[in-house]
Image: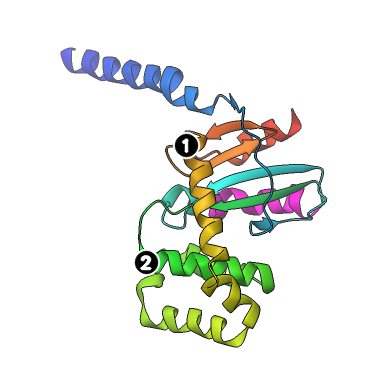
Amino acid sequence: MYGISVVLLVFIFYSLIDKFFLKESKRPIDLDQVVTTHENDIVFGDQNSPKSVYVYFSYKCGYCKRFFREVFPQLKTNYIDKGKLKLVLKLVEASEDVDMLYALQVAVGVNKFGQVEKFHELLLHDSRVVYTDEFKDLCDDFVRANSDIAECVLGGNANEYLKSNYQEYVDLNLTGTPSFIFNQQLYKGYMEYSEFENILKN
């Protein structure tokens, strides 16, 4: 009997946490700061789509990867491919990780002057690839083969963009990734597709 009571108390405790704390993080926070699309953002969808979702995003983040694995395909099919929505990635790197920063700088250049999808998928699959010699050689090849990408990476434009993203991240008081912004309303943390759909419909 005592054991059953303990189990019930534990269940009630976690139910209360879920109701009053975890769900709280899904409530939108109105932003004073206007978030807009930057020319170096990675954009999925038509630039002229009537709705935009901004996501502060890290390839090191497990929940960011889960979003692209479980939620993005449905968003793409039901909204992005139909021209109803564009998803705008705001790449964030808080550390001084030289290898990751170089990978992100090259991603910015490839996105601006080429096709970034395969590069994006590679980083999503396993971000630790940035520490391999093969990946570094791949990045170097992109820079050598395209003078525009080289200028973006070596000239500092990509680095300045990443710094500005991180400053926005700080100014918005974000504490983790992914963080989503719909119509200047902030939603912190991973969300299921049903939560996205509910927000988009309302």
At label 2, which amino acid type do we have?
Answer: Val
Q: Quadrant of residue 9?
A: top left
Image mark count: 2
| Image coordinates for residue 123, horizontal then vertical, percent | 48, 66
Query: Where 88 falls versus 18 (above or below)?
Result: below
**Residue at 54% from the left image edge and 72% from the top image edge:** 153
Label annotation for residue 98: 2
Residue reaching furthest to the left: 2
Query: Where 180 falls versus 5 (above or below)?
Result: below
**Residue at 53% from the left image edge and 58% from the top image edge:** 160
Q: Nearer the viewer, residue 4 or 151?
A: 151
Q: Is residue 201 visible?
A: yes
| Image coordinates for residue 162, horizontal then vertical, percent | 52, 56
Q: Quadrant of residue 7?
A: top left
At label 1, which amino acid type do we have?
Answer: Leu
Q: Which residue is mark 1?
A: 174
Q: Nearer the viewer, residue 6 or 188?
A: 188
Q: Is residue 178 visible?
A: no
Query: Where 100 falls versus 194 (above or below)?
Result: below
Magenta-drawn stretch, dominant element (helix, strand or loop):
helix
| Image coordinates for residue 140, horizontal then vertical, percent | 49, 82
Residues in magenta, as a range: 66-82
